[in-house]
Amino acid sequence: MNTPSRSESSPAPTVVRCESPADFLASLPVLLGYVPEDSIVLTLFEGSQAKSAARFDLPQADVPLESTQLDRAMLELIEQHPWVSAVALVAYCSDSFANQPGAPHALLAMWLERALEMHGTPVRELACVASDGWAVYRSSEASSGGNPLSEIAHSQFVKRKGLTGFSPPEPLRELGSLPHPQPKLASALRQALARAETVPPKALTADHMQAMLQQCHQALSEGLSPGTAQETASFVHTRSELETWLTPVLLIAAGGVGEPLTVDDDLAQTFLEFVQDDAKTTRPTVVKRLKLFSSERLEPSQLRATVQTLTEVAAHTPDALRPGVLALAAWAWWMGGMTTPAITLLREAAGIDPHQASVTIVQELCESGPPLWAFSDDTR
């Protein structure tokens, strides 16, 4: 499940009126921040406004057992947000209207609608977006081939709003992908890695920590370029040398990508104590600490910027050092409520080194469920 999310383009939500089902379906990728695929999207309404939306994997078959598991997950999510007055359900699938007598996944949709309404939650929209059309379930179009997808692409929502200020949402499958490496950048980073000095965690001092934090923050804020290759190399080595990875995580939260960060003696000493403490801490304790840390939602645009930088760095990092960077990018996706791209990156990291500490820690976080902020009313 990808947890409730909102459009991240501005701190203040933009209110746009949807006057038809096609308008609503055109607005969902903007609300989510990506284009769903093989998904069930549950939109949470407070009054007449869609406040947030959550994505669930589309079951392989519309069988009652899988449907029951899915409706339980949806009901649990709704119960955690008492402000919800109604919901909408939309199935996104690669099936087609042409290959069946009615709308794809109609049995699943009706099952979920019944379960939600028995719970006392009205379903104000129940629709399907397939590979060759869309339809509102129980409409005449649902049993006659559906409506053309062009009605969504050219809806009044798109014409009126023009998606001004919004980047076109990416397909879900592309969110966890790495960019194509540029040979010059890869070469610059390899040379910088060869020059970079590494300090084992037990030998770290406050001075080492101060320099490391400043370099890591600079690498994350400025991104990878020939001019920042040395700072990026220090960051990559830090990711591979630390026995645990709590310090870089806290660095992102404390400094913020693109925000100024001054590392004074007190801050350096605090982070050094974290590293020394983590070296003596069991992995389950580190996972628990990171889970507790997830109770506060970090700025979504900051996390997206972090992911963009980390995936760029990972694409140019040699395989032996890549899993730690991939795991940190996966953590950033998970902290943003996006488990699907996190798992994609973890699979790639595990393919290189399945026992790397960062990889196993983030895997445990993903398996533990959504970040704790997702259970707060502040997701509105």
Image (tube, rainbow, N blue to C red):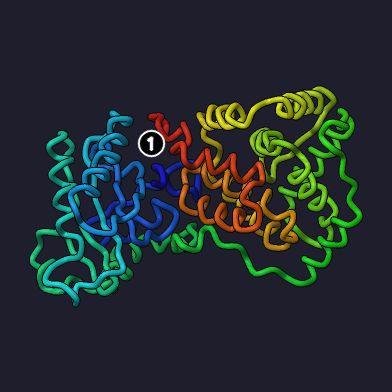
Q: Is residue 310 left or right of residue 35?
A: right
Query: Does residue 255 appear anywhere in the picture?
Result: no
- Horizontal side of 87 relative to 260 (left or right) equals left
Quadrant where the C terminus is found in the figure: top left
* Label 1 neighbour load within 10 Å: few <14, some 14-19, many 20+: some
Q: Position of residue 326 (x, y in %)?
A: 63, 52
State the image coordinates of residue 227 (x, y, percent, origin top left). Answer: 84, 59
- Give x and y (percent) for residue 319: 72, 60
Q: From where the camera sits, is residue 250 visible?
A: yes
Taking the image as shown, residue 187 lies to the left or right of residue 10, namely right
Q: Residue at x 68, y 48 (%)?
A: 324
Closer-to-camera residue (231/345):
345
Residue extending furthest toward the front: 355
Q: Quadrant of residue 229?
A: bottom right
**Residue 17 appears left or right of 201:** left
Label 1's element?
Answer: loop
Residue at (52, 38) in percent of width and height: 365
Which amino acid does the dot numbered 1 rest on? Arg
Q: Nearer the viewer, residue 281 or 249?
A: 281
Residue annotated with mark 1: 380
Q: Residue at x 14, y 56 (%)?
A: 107
What percent of the width, then of the height, locates residue 46?
27, 37
**Quadrant location of residue 284?**
top right
- Point 85% across, 56% down: residue: 193
**Count of residue discs:** 1
